[in-house]
Amino acid sequence: MERELRYLGEALGNPTRPFVAVLGGAKVSDKIEVIDNLIPRVDRLLIGGAMAYTFFKAMGKPVGKSLVEDDKLALARQIMAKADNVRPTPLKFMLPVDHIVAPRLEAGAPSETLLVDDAAIGDRMGLDIGHATAKAYAAALRDAKTVVWNGPMGVFEIDDFARGTMAVARAIAEVHGTTIIGGGDSIAAVKKAGVTDRITHISTGGGASLEFLGGQTLPGVAVLPQA
């Protein structure tokens, strides 16, 4: 627990810069508070996973049958507006520029890489970031001194849709600074990529670590100074 508080606390309170956050996973709603709390703190915010499609739909981009939280579209617009306006210097808010799409979520499904504004997605779904996005995200991580990563870039459990997540895991492993991985899927991803031993801190706090990154006061932490 001491390691959790030290690494997460320093990342939020006194990070060595550039400070880059990478957030993925299925839903924007799972990470609303984290995104909101990180926007004024990080230098770059990289978004991947299915949660990106709520942002894309909010921007009017074609999303096909990709997972979208329709009730969070207004919130997605608010987040993007905050990223543009909350800081004295602009935050680099990065969304995928290409993605791997397929008609169904299963190994061996016919897939194709498209630009995210390509209406050819049709009735297919986005299941991973594409090569150009993985390359751009690796470049955004290259000079980072503090990195926080929570959530995969795609359905990495299926090898056909794991390349983006594996590329990000390897890029984070190359960072010369403090790297913090949180969340069960992200931990599984760094294990699958074979880079666990090159990560500074792997958080086992689960939902509590997300709440901490979201700026919430955790009861078990709040009582420690009085203990």
Image (tube, rainbow, N blue to C red):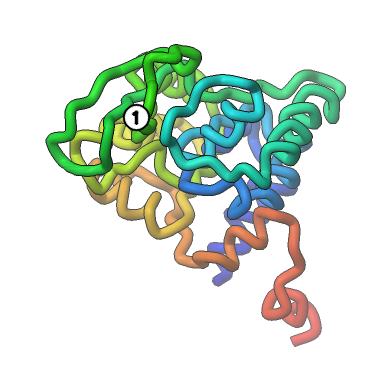
Instruction: Look at the image and tell me whether residue 179 can be seen.
Output: no
Task: Work out whether 188 lies above or below 73.
Answer: below
Please tell me which residue is depicted at 65% across the width and 62% down the height of the picture: 211
Q: For residue 40, which quarter of the picture? A: top right
The quarter of the picture where the N terminus appears is: bottom right
Q: How many marks?
A: 1
Q: In the image shown, does 104 or 96 lie closer to the viewer?
A: 104
Q: In the image shown, does 130 or 44 lie closer to the viewer?
A: 130
Considering every residue shown, the one lying at the far front of the view is: 123
Mark 1 — residue? 124
Task: Work out whether 3 lies above or below 132.
Answer: below
Left or right: residue 7 versus residue 115 is right
Three-letter code for the amino acid on which mark 1 is drawn: Arg
Instruction: Look at the image and tell me whether residue 101 can be seen.
Output: yes
For numbered disc 1, what is the local secondary structure?
Answer: loop
Considering every residue shown, the one lying at the far left of the view is: 108
Q: In the image shown, does 55 or 35 lie closer to the viewer?
A: 55
Considering every residue shown, the one lying at the far bottom of the view is: 227
Please tell me which residue is depicted at 31% across the width and 54% down the height of the picture: 188
Left or right: residue 155 versus residue 72 is left
Residue 195: x percent and y percent? 28, 43
The quarter of the picture where the C terminus appears is: bottom right
Residue 23: x percent and y percent? 53, 41
Residue 126: x percent and y percent? 38, 31
Q: For residue 59, which quarter of the picture? A: top right
Question: Callout 1: 10 Å neighbours few (<14), some, many (20+)?
Answer: some
Q: In the image shown, does 35 or 200 lie closer to the viewer?
A: 35
Task: Work out whether 196 lies above or below 79.
Answer: below
Please tell me which residue is depicted at 58% across the width and 23% down the height of the picture: 94
